[in-house]
Every structure is written in structure tokens, then in C-alpha cells.
């Protein structure tokens, strides 16, 4: 069990390194993607799209996920967020490089730590980039849950 966890963590770190290298090589991704979108909103949507594309170009199968984890500090409420899930030899790894985060964890652990709600939207890199082009924004693209405030992460 412990050796499997160590292997998953090592695979996650290798994946993170490869994706980061690919992102740094992409001149079209410099600048705006890494900046906060506006005010107190984060940069998770554009960063997730860029990370998924970089993972795909590095030879991995990746999807962009738009979902609702729960804040782990006050006010402890769900918020809209985006991250990437990448298939590896050791299983599926959640990669989150938004807002200064540097996370690459097994998906189950990422969901557990974020207390992520079951409702989520999943997009291939091609789908997310087509939605970006068609909508003129990076997301979210799913319809907000009625009665809940939308806060971008």
C-alpha cells in the first residue's frame, strides 16, 4: 500500500514536470493565461485549458473538469473551479496549477481533500478549446446550479 502511494506520488511529480516544461515551451501561453482573470476571481479556467493541451502534447490523455469543491477555510462553501485529470500508468492524476497551486494528486485524494461535489462537467482538450473559441471566455461552460452563487476559482 505504501509503495503504491509512493509510486503514484512519483508519477504525479513526473507528470507535473513534463506538463510544466511543455507549458513553458509554448510561447502562445505566456502572459495572460497565468494572470488572475479579474478582481478576486482566479485563473483556474484558462490554466486548466492550457494544462490539458500541454498534457495532450506531451502524450497523455487528459480532460478538463469543471466542478465544485468546497472551500477549506471560512466561509466553507462550494465554489466553481477547473482542474485537469490525466491518465497515467499509475492511474488518474488530478493536476491543478491555478492560482499559485502546484498539485498533482491521485484523483480520489484530490476529490477527498477538496470535498468535491459529484456534479461536474468533463471536456476533452479539443472540446474545451472549441467552447473557448465559440463563447469568447474560458469557462465555466456548464449551467450553474439554481440558487447557488457562482464564484470562479
Image (cartoon, rainbow, N blue to C red):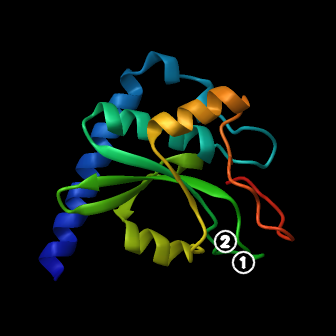
Across and down, in percent, residue 133 comes to 64, 26
Q: Kindly identify the residue that appears in the image at 59 percent across and 37 percent down.
A: 46
40 is higher (above) or lower (below) than 68: above
Front position in the image: 53 or 13: 53
Mark 2 vs mark 1, CA separation in Å: 5 Å
Q: Secondary structure at mark 2?
A: loop
105 is higher (above) or lower (below) than 17: below
Q: Kindly identify the residue that appears in the image at 40 percent across and 74 percent down.
A: 109
Identify residue for label 1.
76
Front position in the image: 101 or 135: 135
Front position in the image: 29 or 128: 128
Q: Is residue 98 found left or right of 135 in the rendered image?
A: left
Location of residue 92 (image quadrant):
bottom left
Q: Is residue 150 found left or right of 58 in the rendered image?
A: right
Front position in the image: 22 or 133: 133
- Tell me the crowding category of disc 1: few under 14, some 14 to 19, or many 20 or more residues within 10 angstroms, Cα based: few
Across and down, in percent, residue 144 comes to 76, 60
Q: Is residue 88 found left or right of 45 in the rendered image?
A: left
**Which disc is residue 130 wearing?**
none
Quadrant containing the N terminus is bottom left
Location of residue 32 (image quadrant):
top right
Q: How many numbered markers are drawn?
A: 2
Q: Secondary structure at mark 1?
A: loop
Quadrant containing the C terminus is bottom right
Identify residue for label 2.
71
Instruction: State whether residue 50 appears in this view.
Output: no
User: Which of pointers 2 and 1 lies earlier in the amino acid sequence?
Assistant: 2
Q: Kindly identify the residue that appears in the image at 34 percent across and 39 percent down.
A: 55
- Tell me the crowding category of disc 2: few under 14, some 14 to 19, or many 20 or more residues within 10 angstroms, Cα based: some
Q: Kindly identify the residue that appears in the image at 74 percent across and 75 percent down.
A: 77
Amino acid at each position: 500500500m505504501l509503495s503504491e502511494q509512493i509510486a503514484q506520488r512519483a508519477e504525479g511529480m513526473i507528470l507535473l514536470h513534463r506538463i510544466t516544461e511543455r507549458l513553458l515551451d509554448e510561447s502562445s501561453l505566456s502572459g495572460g493565461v497565468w494572470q488572475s482573470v479579474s478582481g478576486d476571481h482566479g485563473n483556474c479556467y484558462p490554466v486548466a485549458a492550457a494544462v490539458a493541451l500541454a498534457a495532450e502534447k506531451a502524450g497523455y490523455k487528459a480532460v478538463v473538469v469543471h466542478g465544485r469543491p468546497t472551500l477549506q477555510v471560512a466561509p466553507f462553501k462550494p465554489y466553481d473551479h477547473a482542474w485537469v485529470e490525466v491518465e497515467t500508468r499509475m492511474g488518474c492524476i488530478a493536476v491543478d496549477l491555478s492560482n499559485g497551486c502546484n498539485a498533482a494528486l491521485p484523483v480520489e485524494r484530490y476529490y477527498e481533500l477538496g470535498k468535491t461535489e459529484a456534479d461536474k462537467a468533463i471536456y476533452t482538450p479539443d472540446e474545451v478549446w472549441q467552447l473557448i473559441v465559440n463563447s469568447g471566455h474560458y469557462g465555466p461552460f456548464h449551467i450553474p446550479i439554481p440558487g447557488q452563487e457562482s464564484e470562479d476559482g
